Structure formats: structure tokens, C-alpha cells
Amino acid sequence: MLLLCPEVYKKLKNELEMMNVTTEIKKRKIPIVRVNRLLNEYDGKILFPDKLEKANEMLKKIGLPKQWVAPCLP
């Protein structure tokens, strides 16, 4: 039998709970977050054009990080 101090036990327990939550989220086929349908009125509208323009400029200059760029398939 392995005896752990209370602090270590709590930390390990929390880590195991988080692992279980993430595996459960990955197994689900339905979304966990429900989006309010009232937000549909903003669909297709640009709410912050100045920020969108600035973000597009930065993407043109710098580009996306490599982890977000899909590899080219032959």
C-alpha cells in the first residue's frame, strides 16, 4: 500500500479527474456548449471592422503559426 501526504493526494486526484473529463469530452458526439439562438442576428455582420482589418494585415505580414497551418497533401 502506498501512503501519500494530503497535498500530493489532492494534486493526483485533481489530475486524474481532469484526465477523465478530457477523455469524456473527446468521446462525446454532441457539443457541450449551447449557443443562444438570439446571436443569429449577428451572423454575416462585421461588428468590429477596424479590428478585422488590423488582424488581416497582421496575418498577411506574419502568417499563421505552423501548428495552425494544415500540411499540403500531394
Image: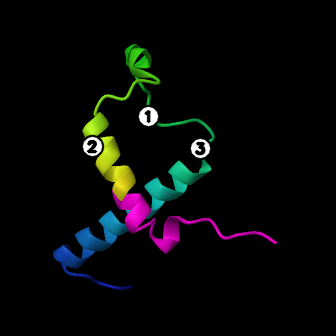
Residue beneath label 1, please?
Answer: 33
Q: What residue is drawn where x is 31% and y is 64%?
A: 14
Which residue position is annotated with label 3? 28
For the N terminus, the image quarter is: bottom left
Q: Nearer the viewer, mark 1 or mark 3?
A: 1
Q: Amino acid at mark 2?
A: Lys
**Magenta segment range?**
58-74
Under mark 1, the amino acid is: Val
Q: Which callout, 3 or 2, points at the residue further toward the start of the chain?
A: 3
Residue at point 39%, 69% (across, down): 62
Q: Nearer the viewer, residue 60 or 74?
A: 60
Which amino acid does the dot numbered 3 rest on? Arg
- Which is nearer the N-term, disc 1 or disc 3? 3
Residue 27 image offset from top left, x and y in percent: 61, 50
Q: Is residue 4 magenta?
A: no
Q: Is residue 62 magenta?
A: yes
Q: Position of residue 9 (x, y in %)?
A: 26, 74
Pick whichever, 39 or 49, lies toward us. 49
Q: Is residue 28 above or below residue 6?
A: above
Q: Quadrant of the C terminus?
A: bottom right
Residue positioned 44% across, 66% down in the render? 63
Number of residues whose C-alpha sits closer than 10 Å to that of mark 1, classed few (under 14), some (14–19) or many (20 or more): few
